Amino acid sequence: MDRRDVLKLGAGFAAALYFARHADVIGEARADDSEPFSFATLVERARQLSLSPYTPPTDTIPENYKDLNYDQYRDIRFKREDALWANDNLGFTAEFFSAGYLYATPVQIFTVANGRATELKYRADLFTYGQNVTPPEGTAPGFSGFRIHTPIDKAYQMDEFAVFQGASYFRAKATGQGYGLSARGLAIDTARPPHDEFPVFRSFWIVRPESGASSVTVFALLDSISVSGAYKFVISARANTVMDVDCTLFPRKTMAHAGIAPLTSMFYFAPSTSYRADEVRNRVHDSDGLAIWNGKGEHIWRPLINSPRVQFSSFVDDAVRGFGLVQRERRGDRYEDFEAHYEQRPSLWVEPRESFGKGSVDLVELPTTTEYFDNIVAYWHPKEPLAAGASYAYKYRLTWCDAPPLRINYATVAQTLVGASLQNAGRRLFNIDFAGTEEFNLCDDSDEFCGDKSRTMELTASAGTIVNATIRRNRVSGGHRVAFEYEPAAGSDEADLRCGLLSDGKPISEVWIYRWTA
């Protein structure tokens, strides 16, 4: 994790730290050492916790550890020889992070073996300390989270591939990737007044895997002003990193804007958005689009934007089949960044293992003038509020990957290019490149432009007018290009544009949906 990733992640949940420090948020989760443990007991613990008044966590972090800067915090390193299961040849190890710096809420960590949980006690001698920081004296800061290692890039080399740290944030990567976007346990009131509510994982239970196991299991207790909950993560790493998540939520308060399986990412700029930074790089983003496979079987591609104001988009659905924030552009020369390597950032796909029912995939896009701020959030929003005193169970799969694990038998959007019209002031020019169109009946090879556009594409705008639309073969990169000019409606400051390709009158592509903003 480099400096810009830490700063970006820190900006992403700085509000969560304020929330944890200054609000009466969290009930203490106490557990005796060597106690019986199962997911059922954790669910009951979360239910009981939801019935009790919440209290803020005990502040055990020394003042000098709260004031650590980035370089000082990086100088606190867990000793690899003391990693969990370091000498047991189980295929997985776990290392732990000290609390301090941005990570101001200590967490309890337990290990589980043979159905019994034992608390892992913080000791200062589990860490090494560089020249920039001194070991803690007196009160122990405690742990702030952990990371899991397994061979994902080279056989017999233990690679870090999953991290749980900060509020309810966690992230992972797959083979050949670096870290990028994050997931969270739960999102509440995202970008809504008076402020987001950030639930926190208060305690973790890490289960000792069997020898030769292909997965490791982690449990977590979530708590917040509005809700408590029990989480189970079964994590496996092959070509992709897959997490099967079970969660049971017990709302203390009715939540009208709860986000299930929330994803958090960064989109700064790209040729697909009107915002341009004064940069030598062509694009900067951890994700470039929201992909949805809805209950009707449509595949939707929504390019991300960096708008001057907050944008809310809601894709109403019944029994969504999957959604995710995707890094589709994988060519390094499109980024020109040999340090951040945005082309290696993972995509993250959410797949319900049991139906989510009625609701919507919600996308929140916040304005940003820096790459250090996670400004994109996507999640499943249940149609009905989560009612106080009730319980709700969700099961879903998270796949950290290059591309969503889908059978692609349709044309996809390869890129979106947006700029000023060359001929008409006030209009915007759009080029949409579709890949995988060759097998469909769109244009004859000898045609420069396709003839009857009503049989080859559907192109609409929720406001304003689309003019000069064309579709032609892309003889440079393959596929087809749709080009058109968009003339905004007078007085309008936003509109949704929609485009899909047809062959013999039938849909053969994912549906491109774009949010234009003034």
Image (tube, grey):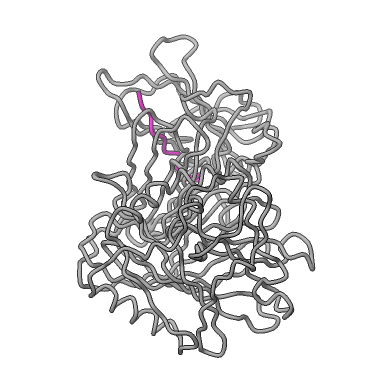
Position of residue 92 relative to residue 295, above or below, is: below
| Camera-nearest residue between 339 and 464 | 339
Quadrant housing the C terminus:
top left
| Camera-nearest residue between 411 and 275 | 275
- Image check: 387 left or right of 207? left
Q: Which residue does the image show at 39% across and 84% down from the upper left?
A: 40
| Camera-nearest residue between 174 and 340 | 340
| Camera-nearest residue between 152 and 405 | 152
Q: Where, by quadrant of the figure, is residue 212 drawn?
A: bottom right
Q: Where, by quadrant of the figure, is residue 246 drawn?
A: bottom left
Position of residue 2 relative to residue 393, above or below, is: above
Q: Which residue does the image show at 24% across and 64% down from the upper left?
A: 386
Position of residue 133 relative to residue 277, above or below, is: below
Question: In x, y percent, where is residue 187?
Answer: 36, 55
Q: Is residue 515 magenta?
A: yes
- Which secondary structure dominates the residues rendered in magenta? strand
Question: In x, y percent, where is residue 109?
Answer: 50, 73
**Magenta region, residue range:** 507-518
